[in-house]
Amino acid sequence: MASPGSVPHEAFLVSSPVQSSEPDRRRAAPHLQFIDGAWSLVRGLRFLWRTPASWLPASVPIVLCMALCVVAVALSLHYVPRLLAVFWPDLSHHTGDLIAAIVRWVAIALSALIGIAVATLVTPILSAPALERLVLLRERELGVPPRPAAGLWREFLSALTSQLLAVAVSAPLLLVLWTVTLLAPAFSVVTIPLKFIVVAWLLAWSLLDYPLSLRGVRLSARVRLFRKGAPAVFGFGVALAVVFAIPFLPLLVLPAAVCAAAEIGVLLERSA
């Protein structure tokens, strides 16, 4: 079987059954679509490496997150001791100076960690214009002709309905799986892989929101595209789930993941 790197990004786009040869049909096999979808993340990294025009927008999420984290830590250092002094003025008197100092630093650390978590969560939202620029650059390289903008309202509505559906479907599933794991640990051999699968689909759906919302693709059309290109989409989601499970990597890989999502989005629409 060919290595993942040798599978072209048009691997599962067979133009017509009449023109398809046996090798084409082999390349269109679901397992090769899965590999191609997973390998799109590597192609996204390669695209960033060889495209200087992408370096500035790709740096925005990291720089923005670092700035927000610095602000979160600074605010914690400045305000937490003052809040403790207001709400617990007799802390040193009741606990002693050493315990009081430990309590203050623990409170500062917890506040800073919460701030860093919030900064990490909001960074992709605040970085949306830069990430959308990466989508346009990647689509241009893939030969997608320029198209009229979908319009800010249509983009927003498309993204909102997409994310609401993702939350509505994934949140109950993850809650059920988490509850089963908690109440019946013996079933974790089943629930943990299922949670991984749900997270993989959720990440793929969320990342593909960038290119599909730019095109104003409606929810019903997205569902059809995902169903038709399910193996490639799932491969993309599995790669995301593995990489995003490693601390500090999600923001570093986010620009490449968006470029990969742009490629997957093009392939899905071409194969529709």
Image (tube, helix red, strand yellow):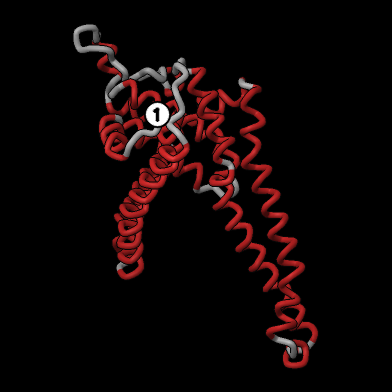
Q: Quadrant of residue 4?
A: top left
Nearest the camera: 161 or 113?
A: 161
> Residue 211, how many percent across, how many down?
44, 32
The residue located at (66%, 45%) in the rendering is 64
For disc 1, the neighbor class at 10 Å (few under 14, some 14 to 19, many from 20) is many
Q: Which residue is mark 1?
A: 265
Q: Secondary structure at mark 1?
A: helix
Quadrant where the image shows the N terminus: top left
Residue at 40% from the left image edge and 29% from the top image edge: 265
Q: Amino acid at mark 1?
A: Gly
Residue at screen point 65% across, 29% down: 55
Query: Would residue 74 appear left or right of 51 to someone viewing this image?
Result: right
State the image coordinates of residue 97 (x, y, percent, origin top left). 80, 85
Task: Specify whether residue 91 is in view.
Answer: yes
**193 relative to 91 in the view: left or right:** left
Q: Looking at the image, can residue 238 be seen?
A: no
Residue closest to the eye, 147 or 56? 147
**Residue sticking out furthest to the left:** 18
Q: Quadrant of residue 96?
A: bottom right
In the depicted view, which residue is nearer to us: 214 or 177? 214
Residue 209 sits in quarter: top left
* Extreme residue in the right direction: 97
Which residue is at the far bottom?
94
